[in-house]
Image: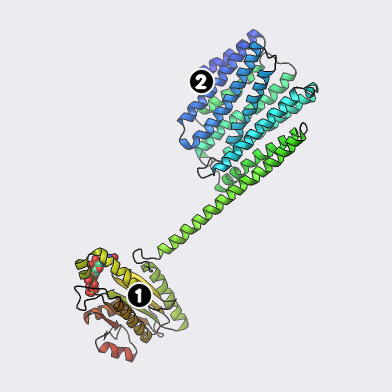
Amino acid sequence: MVWLLVLLLIIHPVLAYWTGHAQDVPPQLAMIAVQGTALWCVVAQYRRSPPLIRMPWLLLALAALMQVLWAIINLLTTLLGDKGGYLTAIGIVFSAMYMIPCMFMVTRSFGRDEPRAIAMLDLVLSCVVAVLLYRFITTLMSGPLAADPSSVYVVIYHADAVDFSLSAMTILRMFGARSFRWRFFYYAASTYLLTNAVVAYAYNRIELQGLPWWAGSMVDIPYVLLVMVIVRPPPRWLRAYHPSLVASQTIASFAPIILTMMVVLLGISVSRISFGIGVFTACASVLFYGLRMALIQSQHVDMQRAVDQSAWRLEQQVGRDPLTGIANRAAMDTRLREALAEGRRTGGFCSLLMIDIDFFKQYNDSLGHVAGDACLVKVACALSSSQLRARDLVARFGGEEFVVVLADTPPETALEVARRLMASIERLQIVHPRCPQGRITVSIGIATQTTDMHVDPLVLLEEADRALYAAKSQGRNCVEVAGENTRALPSSLSAFNANGGAAL
Ligand SMILES: Nc1nc2c(ncn2[C@@H]2O[C@H](COP(=O)(O)OP(=O)(O)OP(=O)(O)O)[C@@H](O)[C@H]2O)c(=O)[nH]1
């Protein structure tokens, strides 16, 4: 590939020197061959690239194709002549159409989640630029305005402004790209666009003085550089450079304004020739930009809503037991710590109820695990709808064990609550074929942090567990309050324990 290019590069000036003029057929053919080689190289890169980055390479290939077609039309004009001016008009069409893929690749962010409507808006605006340029050039270069020498300069200045704006924006995009593949694409594109702009700048001015034989060889430079950039290993700084997320996002958001700005400027220029069209396009471009921003804004609002919802769902799930839907162990730990701290601060009590379903293994064994799960859900539901205060927390501790945290609750009240809970389970009347009562019952252990004692959550849990164990030993279906063996209790409750637990 490189050797073919080198050969063409030598042939082109040799032919130009031999024919004596850059615009003769042989040098033009050599130039088209150089352009074609570069086009082929970009297409090969497009086919090699992963899907997400194919689109910009395709756009670059389209831009190069427009230039090749323009050169072919120029060649046909040399060969056939152009009496009606049709070939010149077609050439201007291709040179204007060159803007569409260029604008598109510079403006777009190519994100997967970008709405299609935005791509359509960008495409329409890019087409408007091409149409305006065509209208502008044809009006100034033919008809009465063509006689005015300043018309040529006006066209040249506009072409330069567009070319240099595009290259500047492409360079900016290169420094804003966070992935190496994208940086490499913009590196190749900016090399091509910038040299193209410089060559066009020089060529147009030389052309005004009459083209020397070597001038055509200048046109090869952007294409040769493009091929070199693609086939040679990329420079090390391109791989090492990493823009910050803020810089990258700012540049990507800023890019569309270049497109709008170009349409506005072209609209202003065209208004010299056709006031209506100029003003209309300038206004339309601003409206389009506003619409583009509104679409992005509404997409962000939607995304934010979805993020909020999933965060809320996650928050709910984190503290929830997936089977029963009530609080889980983690939520209980947090609430218990808070309630104990509150008790210490205010000098109040904090009680903990440890509840365990009796003979649950037998229930599972006789009716199956699915029925066991359904039973757990019903028990959880009954516990949490037993007229507790909003600040009390019912949680599934694990397996068939539940815990109720009762902040600011003395042991006497905790005992009343426990009775109420047992009664609500009893009301469920869940048949248990292998339980002496013939229905599901629970045993409860109570532990309390008293005003004069500061207890660690784990210690309180252990005490409640010991009390529960005692309740189980007493024959189940009863409440046991953590007693003298763990901590001193009010006399009324000690008496209650002394009776061997409260059979309800
Ligand atoms: N269906 C179901 N069963 C569970 C779940 N978690 C724990 N279990 C069962 O609960 C049973 C608990 O058995 P044990 O610890 O022996 O308690 P028990 O049979 O209730 O006996 P006591 O507590 O002494 O009355 C075990 O068979 C566990 O498999 C669950 O999420 N779903």
- The dot on residue 444 is none
> Could you say which is closer to the camera, residue 259 or residue 239?
259
Quadrant of the rendered structure where residue 192 is? top right
Residue 398 seen: no
Split into 4 quadrants, where in the image is the C terminus? bottom left
Quadrant of the rendered structure where residue 197 is? top right
In percent of the image, x 54 and y 25: which residue is there? 228
Which x, y percent locates residue 36?
55, 20
In percent of the image, x 60 and y 11: which residue is there? 26
Could you give the CA–CA distance between mark 1 and mark 2, rounded to whole angstroms? 81 Å
**Crowdedness of circle 2 by 10 Å Cα count: few (<14), some, many (20+)?**
few
User: Sequence order check: which comes first, mark 1 or mark 2?
Assistant: 2
Q: Is mark 2 within 8 Å of ligand 1?
A: no
Q: Name the residue under label 1.
A: 383
Q: Image check: 47 left or right of 202?
A: left
Which x, y percent locates residue 94?
63, 25
Which x, y percent locates residue 31?
59, 17
In the rendered view, would you say 220 is above or below 417?
Answer: above
| Ligand number 1: quarter of image | bottom left
Give the foreground label among 1 and 2. 1
> Could you say which is closer to the camera, residue 87 or residue 185?
87
> Could you say which is closer to the camera, residue 206 or residue 140?
140
Amino acid type, residue under disc 1 in the picture: Leu
Per the image, label 2 sits on a secondary structure element best described as helix
- The dot on residue 2 is 2
Per the image, label 1 sits on a secondary structure element best described as helix
> Could you say which is closer to the camera, residue 425 or residue 202?
425
